[in-house]
Image (cartoon, grey):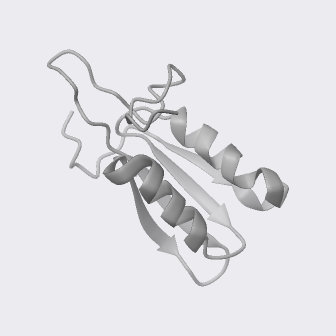
Amino acid sequence: MDCSSENHLSTHTFDARGIAKRFRHSAIFGAIESLNDGETMRFINDHDPLPLLAQLATRYGDQVRPVYVDRSGPVVIDFHIHAHKTSETEAGACGGGGNGCGCGSGH
């Protein structure tokens, strides 16, 4: 699969507005780490999550690419997963579909 393609396998909605604020970031990280290469998480929030975006950049680098969809009402951001291939037969994802993080950040 061409990771640069915007033709993503599937999009999964994550509405953070219903999650207690103290649990949001860990829930978001868990959701992202369960995605496979080429999948997208459509994130919906009640505010622009600038601290979260900084944490995602630090934690996942260019494996998670945020793209704003809407900023006028609830903020909607698509997080596209682009895993790095570590060998010819292995492609890690930020979660590898629940098989542990393939982003190499040591978590």
Percent across and percent down for residue 17 are: 77, 62
Residue lying farthest left? Answer: 88
Can you say whether 50 is above or below 37 in the image? Answer: below
Q: Image quadrant of residue 74?
A: bottom right
State the residue in front, 17 or 95: 95
The answer to whether 19 is drawn above or below residue 10 in the figure is below
Residue name at image x 85 percent, y 56 percent: 20
Pinpoint residue 16: horizontal percent, then vertical percent.
72, 57
Front-most of 26 and 31? 26
| Percent position of residue 25, x then y | 67, 53
Q: Residue at x 49, y 35 (%)?
A: 35
Q: Tell me if residue 98 comes above or below residue 84 in the rendering.
A: above
In which quadrant is the N terminus drawn?
A: top left
Kindly identify the residue that appears in the image at 43 percent across and 61 percent down. Answer: 66
Q: How many labels does the image show?
A: 0
Check the image and name the residue furthest to the top.
Answer: 89
Q: In which quarter of the image is residue 90?
A: top left
* In the depicted structure, whether residue 88 falls above or below residue 36: above
